[in-house]
Amino acid sequence: MIRIVTTGRLKRLEQDAEQARARVREVQEQADTALGRHVHNAVELTARTVQAEAAASAARWDKDIAAAESEHLRERVVELEAALERAEATTDEVGVLLSHALDALSAAQQELLLKDNEIRRLREELRGEPVEGWSLTLLLHHGEPHTIYASREDAHADTATHGMPADHVWKPCDDRPPAAFTWRCEAFIYNPVSNGFRRFPMPVPKQIEGAA
């Protein structure tokens, strides 16, 4: 079936595409923020652990003081190791969040691709011009125009939605008037000379009284 493309519809699709692009940027920013936060915490905890171990080594010069300091530092190391374990647990959580973010990013990119393809197709339809030999099919219902289709096959397929059986066999029409048929297809061919579509085959002209 021929679809009428309007500027309003094209504009709505472009707006949808822009919203999809904004969603892609938002999801990407969230993923970058979560990953950056995790890396920063891991680096900070590692640096603090290294500092604590260095301080423990330097404190051994004084046995008495070193013993107290060592115990304190051991406790500190235990705290830092626990914090590191929590950070590793957070890594798993960040990984899950990042996975969801990537899934959402992929879905948004796919949606954006579909929108772009639809916009491109509609623009091509708007720019398209009929060429010689291009045919259209007019579907008549009891002789009255019903719908225009790009091909006879499309017309035959669509009449099934109006009560025609799926296995209906279409046959050439006889000389009865169009109104005698429930559904009837008429082909029209584009004529560049007249810049219009002419019925095919052309009906035989009837002699008008008084005309040669």
Image (cartoon, rainbow, N blue to C red):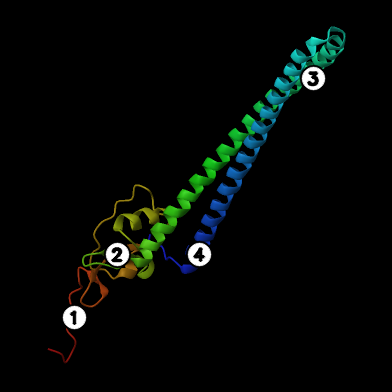
**Going by the picture, which residue comes out furthest to the top?**
63
Q: Is residue 196 left or right of residue 140?
A: left
Q: Quadrant of the C terminus?
A: bottom left
Label 3 vs label 4, nearer the camera: 3
Is residue 151 among the parts visible in the rendering? yes
Mark 4 lies on a secondary structure that is helix
Amino acid type of the residue tagged 3 in the rendering = Glu
Relative vertical location of residue 196 with respect to residue 81 in this rendering, above or below: below
Question: Where is residue 184 drawn, in percent x and y?
Answer: 32, 63
Residue annotated with mark 3:
79
Residue 158, labelled with which disc?
none
Image quarter of residue 177 = bottom left
Question: What is the distance, in whole Å, between disc 3 and disc 1 at their CAs?
Answer: 104 Å
Q: Which mark is residue 136?
A: 2
Residue 128 found in image quarter: bottom left
Mark 3 vs mark 2, CA separation in Å: 79 Å
Q: Quadrant of the N terminus?
A: bottom left
Residue name at image x 67 percent, y 36 percent: 37
Report crowding for label 2: few under 14, some 14 to 19, many 20 or more residues within 10 A (C-alpha): many
User: In the picture shown, does residue 210 fall above or below 206?
Assistant: below
Which amino acid type corresponds to the residue marked 4 in the rendered image?
Lys
What's the residue at 59%, 33% (across, down)? Answer: 99
Q: Left of 205 or right of it: where is 73?
A: right
Task: Give the camera-side residue of 96 and 193.
Answer: 96
Q: Quadrant of residue 199?
A: bottom left
Label 1 CA crowd tier, 10 Å (few <14, some 14–19, many 20+): few
| Residue type (three-letter) at the residue carrying disc 1 | Lys
Distance in Å between CA atoms under marks 4 and 1: 49 Å
Q: Which residue is mark 4?
A: 11
Residue with the mark numbered 1: 206
